[in-house]
Amino acid sequence: MNRKLISYLLILIVIVVSTTSMFKPLFNNISYGLDLKGGFEVLYEASSLDGKEVNREMITNTYKTILKRIDVLGVSEPDVIIEGSNRIRVKLAGVTNKEEAREILSKTASLTFRDTADNLLMTSEVLTGGMARLTSDQYGLPAVMLTISDRETFFKVTNTVKDMTDNRIVIWLDFEEGITSFEAEAFRCGSLTDSKCLSAASVSQAFASNVIIQGNFTREEASNLVELINSGSIPTKLEEISSRTVGSVFGENALNKTLLAGAIGISLIILLMTLLYHFCGLIAGIGIVIYTFAVFVIFWLIGGVLTLPGIASLVLGIGMAIDACVISFERIKEEIKKGRTLIGSFVEGYKKSLSSIIDANITTFIVAIIMFIFGESSVKGFATMLMINIIMTIIIMVVIIRYVLKLFVKTNFFEQKSYLFIKVKAKMIVKLTSKTKVNNQLTYQKFNFVKKYKFFFLLSSLIITVGIISVLTMNLNLSVDFKGGTYITLISDYKIESSEIKTDINNFDYQYSDIDNINNKTVYIKLDEVLEREEIQTLDHYFKEKYNAESEVGVISNIVKKELTLNALYSILAAAIGMILYVSIRFKFTYALAALIALFHDVLIVVALFSLLRIEISVIFIAAILTIIGYSINDTVVIFDRIRENINNYFKEKKPSDDDLTNVVNTSLSENLRRTLYTTTTTLLPVICLILFGTFEIFNFNIALFIGLIIGTYSSIFLSSQIWYLLEKNNITINLNKYNIEDELDEIEIKGINK
């Protein structure tokens, strides 16, 4: 009986049970986004009331004001983000009355000082923000005092007004150009319930003191006015340039479906890893459970808001995290087959795999950073989760899993049980003696990957050409993200016919570019018009009444459309440049150029297939493309790492010939083929589960990932290394000292390791 082995197993069981039992309370405490909880999102563009340039202080004050307004709605965890120099994005997950939220948020609620001809004299910039307070007028009636901050401007304005024929300054709350006027409001001015005209005071002399607004206010009305002024005295006007509303039914369905898909995907990965690597695979599966929990904990600690793309990123990250284990396990198996002891194989396998794992994850991390910088909200969430995934991959799937496996190896229980430990049969192990020589020739490979390169180049060129023709003749099926307009998704308790919806839309006199039945109870509508707030409310009420349907509505203006398109191009370009620079530094430029061509190929193929299949391309598609780029370069870097190692191992004394280079590429690809296929399979499993069991909102995203992962694997095996061969065959540079192997392999006995 191996007591250490039993102890370690019991500790593992306790850890797994404890971890799984904490998932539910963790999920209960995580903040969920609109797509998982329902709610309201709007993007505002702020402009100055007096035509001045919007500065940072104005935007900050607007941001604070919006937060105060949200407090009135009772939303526990609002997400308000300043984007760029003059934009504010507001996300209110779980808000029940979306119309009220829209009304309160879009309310300008700003003070202006005008003459009786409605000419603007001053904005609330002259006031000390948030300093309105209750006071009394000369007769002891409730009034509101405003504290003046810009006394110089106030003095100049009052000095001018005192000499006017009508020397009154009118104080307005939410004055609307062309709609509101003092002439129409004069007799109601000072009545807070009936008029936006708060006060019309005569100015007999220039002054720079505080201002008192007096009228026929009750104490309650004056108190409400103080609240309005303090929460709304901002010198900006908010224009709604995009919005999204999500019904609670959508959120609940999306969360349940995505979590189910994720659970099934993780279970299949654990099962597959156990079948492929036996005990090591089982430990890796346990690592994935801990990894998933750790990712959610980190996400919760940083205050992240979990969205559908975020979960998709996690599920994808799980598949990619397994790659770290697969690379190490395949290296360990190679060393065992060479006749090393288990502990020697374990140490050497992890040592040789480390550079591949680090390089592969750093290239993907570069992609995540680019996504975070250039992406909009949902893409940023995806990128945040991806960065956490990569960090946790290194910490848990490399460092901790290695430590745990080493503990079990050192129990000596598996020393003669390599098949049970990592599925290496005894007949596959070479028996070493002190006279055994290392084979200094590259292993002969049955399949010549390099010789067939023309066929694969031709195949890729054909698909890309057909895709380009498709794009030029039929155009891409762009969503409203890139076309501008409005999308509406309806979900009902009973069947909705798309023909009925078409009639409804025609009756409203809107132009639709697409109306599809996603399933019997879900309809997707794409309108060319950018609907206004009132129009959205009208449609929402109409569909609710007629079909008892919950709706998700998104509006993208032309301004946002242009920026999303530019950001998409910038992000792809920046990601490519970042990765190429890294690969050039870590390897050399020929590797980087080969990788760039292969990545360009992958993107073109995915876009071509989306065009041919008429699949809609939305903003989250860019996250998919960037993920594909990250995955493809990840896979390619691992193969390049093996090519570099083989060159340095086998050609220390001479420059390799063309035939030698061919053999290097063929051998390196053959050595990595199984690992590449295993990794692709484990990554595809959760993606397939998301396609089969996930929600409609990220269906196209998952389809893009599915196609892209297959294309990325194809390019890694059949294109990138062959391109490198063509670039390098007449320009080889060898680092003679980077890798060294011994001419004779004698096992050295080290106490505590193999003795």
Image (cartoon, rainbow, N blue to C red):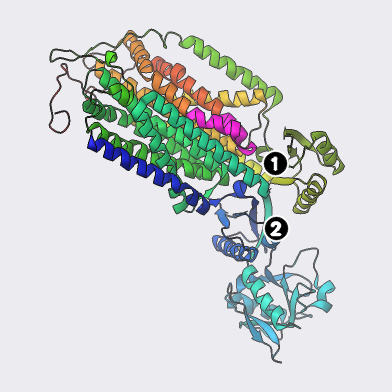
Magenta part, dominant SS: helix
Residue ID for mark 1? 484
Quadrant for the N terminus in the image: top left
Q: Residue at x 26, y 21 (%)?
A: 336
SS class of the residue under badge 1? loop
The percent position of residue 324, horizontal first and vertical second, equals 37, 31
Q: Residue at x 67, y 63 (%)?
A: 49
Q: Quadrant of residue 730?
A: top left
Q: Quadrant of residue 754?
A: top left
Left or right of 686 in this view: 92:
right
The percent position of residue 308, horizontal first and vertical second, equals 57, 42
Quadrant for the C terminus in the image: top left
Which residue range is magenta in the image? 683-705
Residue toward you, 12 or 215: 12
- 669 relative to 41, above or below: above
Q: Residues within 10 Å of mark 2 (few under 14, many from 20)?
A: few
Magenta includes 687? Answer: yes
Residue ID for mark 2? 97
